[in-house]
Image (tube, rainbow, N blue to C red):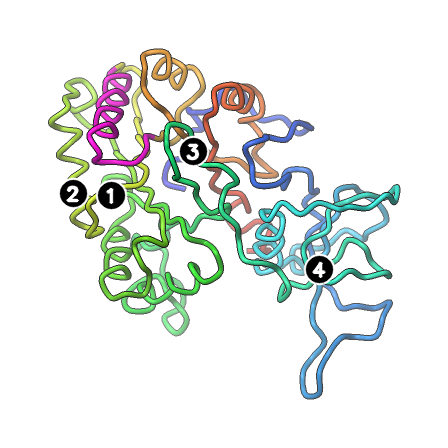
Amino acid sequence: SPHAQAGWYLDRPATRRSRSIPAMFAASVATLPAHALATRRRRDARPVSEKGTSPRRVIIARASSDETPRASPAEITRRAVLSTAAGLAAGVSANDDRASGGIVLPGSPFAFEPNVAFAADLPSVPRASSPLKHTRDLAPSRVIKGCWQLSGGHRGDAATDRTSGAAAVEDFAPFVAAGVTTFDTGPEACGYGPSELVIGEALRQGFVNRDDVQLFTKLCCVGREQSNMTADWVNQKLDLPKRRLGVDKLDLVQMYWNDYGQKKYVDAALFLTDAKHDGKIGAVGLTNFDTERMAQMIDAGAEISSNQIQFSLLDRRPEKVMVEYCQKNGVALLPYGVVAGGVFGGA
C-alpha cells in the first residue's frame, strides 16, 4: 500500500492475540492461523480427475490449530490464499455439529475431509449485504480489485506482466465476471499513476459496463492545501478523476491526509459531504485515518461511509479501537493488505 508507512493512522501498537471479529467484514478471515492455508493432493480418497487431466488440488481452511501439519512458505500458494479469501467472502460457514468445527468453503461436501473445497467450485464473489451508510444502493463487492499495481512501478517479468498496456485494460473483464465489481484507484498524487486512465479505457472499450461496476478513488491532500482548504480546491480535484475515468459521477471518494498537525481535514470532509449532496459523488470515505480524527469529522456533520485501512492476519491493530467505533457508527472498513503483501503466498 502507498500509505502504510510509519503506521501513524493506527490507534495502538499491534498485539499478537485478539479474538474479536469485525461485524462489517465479509467473513472471519482473521480467525484462520497463517499455517492453515495450504494446497495438497487428496491422499485419503481416490483423486478426482477426468481422462487426460490431473487430480484437482484442494484448499484447506481450518479455524483451529489441530493436527494439520504446519505448511512451509513454499507450500502456500498465492492462488490458494486468494481463492480461500474469496470463498470466505461469500460468508459460508460450517453448518456442522462436529466438535472440530471450522470453516467450510463453498463446494462439494467431502465425508473424508469436512473442511475442504475445490478452488474451481468457489462461487462468484457476492456484493455486500447492505449498502454503505449515507447511500441508497452503493454496495461494493466483498473482494475489491485494488489498482495500485497499475501505477507503473510494479511491473513483473516482461513475458507475463499484465499491469500495463492492453493486457491491463482487458483484465478488468474477468474480474467483473468473477463478481469483483468494485475497483479501488486514486490519482497520481497518491501514487496510483495512470490507473484511473486504465479503468477509463476499459469502460470506453466496453470491457466493462459502467452500470456493473463501482469506482472508488481518492482525494489526496498532501500539500499547501492542508492549511488553506477550500471548496473550490476540492471540486477541482473531483473533476480530474471524472475526466480520467470518463464518468459523470464518482461512486466513492476517500480522503487521504498526511499531516495531522494541519486541522483542515474536518473542513475537507464537510466539503466532500456537500459534493455528495450536489450529486458529484456517491459517498464520502477516508483512507488511513485514525479513530480520533474520524470521530472529529463525524461529530462535525461529515457523512463518512468508510475508512480504508491496513488489516490482516498479521496486522490486527484496528481491532484495538477502530473496529468498535465503526460498528457503533455504521462506518464500513475497507481493508487492504489482507494477504500481507504476498506473505501468505510464499512471495
**Going from the N terminus, do you reach mark 1 or mark 3 first?**
3
Residue 240's disc number: 2
Circle nearer the viewer, 1 or 4: 4
* Magenta-highlighted residues: 264-284
Residue type marked 2: Leu
Label 1: element kind: loop
Whether pointer 2 and pointer 1 mark residues with C-beta atoms closer than 8 Å, the reply is yes
Q: Are marks 3 and 2 in contact (CB under 8 Å)?
A: no
The residue indicated by pointer 3 is 132
Q: Secondary structure at mark 3?
A: loop
Q: Main secondary structure of the magenta part?
A: helix
Front in this rendered view, residue 311 or 127: 127
Q: Which residue is tagged 1?
A: 187
Neighbour tally class for label 1: few under 14, some 14-19, many 20 plus, Cα within 10 Å: many
User: How many marks on residues?
Assistant: 4
Q: Amino acid at mark 1?
A: Pro
* Lower position in the chain sequence, tag 4 or tag 3: 4
Identity, as a three-letter code, of the amino acid under mark 4: Ala
